[in-house]
């Protein structure tokens, strides 16, 4: 897992794709073939492209999703070429080394828990929340899970802690914004797009 230096918060009117991280960045191993993470990585390319095109044309139809941490904390987010299950997944770190181990993880928005499980050889402890109209968020490699399938969660509710479970090399939060089963470019609030591949800093300032 690459541990980048914290950067300034990124607020972009449109998404700009930057070159991939250098090969010197430490990468997590490939997920085990039977894992949920590997299954999600197998989404057909044509379906993924169609969903992402649809999302790009209707930004205002997205749910309002916040940075999944406490207000006032700046987290560094990054991706890389070959990131599983998608380049558009984001690995979020705070501080350096294992500083983020045990830090609280919060919901990006209210919703219903559709998965809360341990994914051996993949996500480790993970939680997936449905927000309506095919939109989900996923939080992985958690130290623990504080909600169960069927639970209704509120915006900014604590659901677990940052961990190093599953297929990882260091503690971090693996985070995804998903539309109709496809990981899409993440957007925090109404205008802060994740700058791929990063690193860049992200801070929650509302709905604390």
Image (cartoon, grey):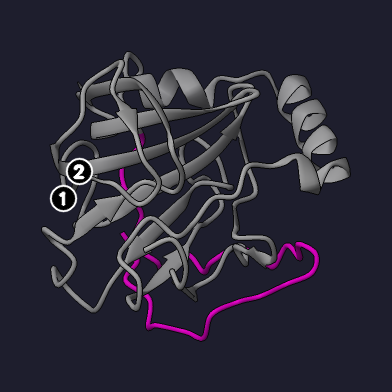
Report the residue at 48% width, 46% height from top: 83
Q: Is residue 144 magenta?
A: no
For residue 45, what is the image quadrant? top right
Q: Which residue is mark 1?
A: 163
Q: Is residue 29 magenta?
A: yes
Looking at the image, residue 5 lies above or below residue 37: below
Name the one closer to the observer, 102 or 96. 102
Labelled disc at residue 92: none
Chain-order first, disc 2 or disc 1? 2
Report the residue at 55% width, 20% height from top: 42
Position of the C terminus, as image quadrant, is bottom left
Tell me, yes or no, if residue 10 can be seen here.
yes
Dot 2 crowding, Cα within 10 Å, few <14, some 14–19, many 20+: many
Position of the N terminus, as image quadrant, is bottom left
Report the residue at 78% width, 38% height from top: 55
Looking at the image, residue 88 lies above or below residue 35: below
Q: Could you say where residue 142 lies in the image, as x and y percent from the top left?
A: 20, 43
Q: Main secondary structure of the magenta part?
A: loop
Horizontal side of residue 116 vs 76, given as left or right: left
Name the one closer to the observer, 46 or 82. 46
Q: Which residues are magenta?
A: 1-30
Q: Could you say where residue 30 lies in the image, as x and y percent from the top left?
A: 36, 36
Helix, strand, or loop for circle 2?
strand
Horizontal side of residue 192 vs 116, given as left or right: right
Labelled disc at residue 142: 2
Is disc 2 in contact with disc 1, using a CB cutoff of under 8 Å? yes
Helix, strand, or loop for circle 1?
loop
Name the one closer to the observer, 71 or 82. 71
Q: Could you say where residue 124 lies in the image, as x and y percent from the top left?
A: 21, 33
Dot 1 crowding, Cα within 10 Å, few <14, some 14–19, many 20+: many
What is the spatial separation of the Cα atoms under label 2 and label 1, in whole angstroms?
A: 4 Å
């Amino acid at each position: 897992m690459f541990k980048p230096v914290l950067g300034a918060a990124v607020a972009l009117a449109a998404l700009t794709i930057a070159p991939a991280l250098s090969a010197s960045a430490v990468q997590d191993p490939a997920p085990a073939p039977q894992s949920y993470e590997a299954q999600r990585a197998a989404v057909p390319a044509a379906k993924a492209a169609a969903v992402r095109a649809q999302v790009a044309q209707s930004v205002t139809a997205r749910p309002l999703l916040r940075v999944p941490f406490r207000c006032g904390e700046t987290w560094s987010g990054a991706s890389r070429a070959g990131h599983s299950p998608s380049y558009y997944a984001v690995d979020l770190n705070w501080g350096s080394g294992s500083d983020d181990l045990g830090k609280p993880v919060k919901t990006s928005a209210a919703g219903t828990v559709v998965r809360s499980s341990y994914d051996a050889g993949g996500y480790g402890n993970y939680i997936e929340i449905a927000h309506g109209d095919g939109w989900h968020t996923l939080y992985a490699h958690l130290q623990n899970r504080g909600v169960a399938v069927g639970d209704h969660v509120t915006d900014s509710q604590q659901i677990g802690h940052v961990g190093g479970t599953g297929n990882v090399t260091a503690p971090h939060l693996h985070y995804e914004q998903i539309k109709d089963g496809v990981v899409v470019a993440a957007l925090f609030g109404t205008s802060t797009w994740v700058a791929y591949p990063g690193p860049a800093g992200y801070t929650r300032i509302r709905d604390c």
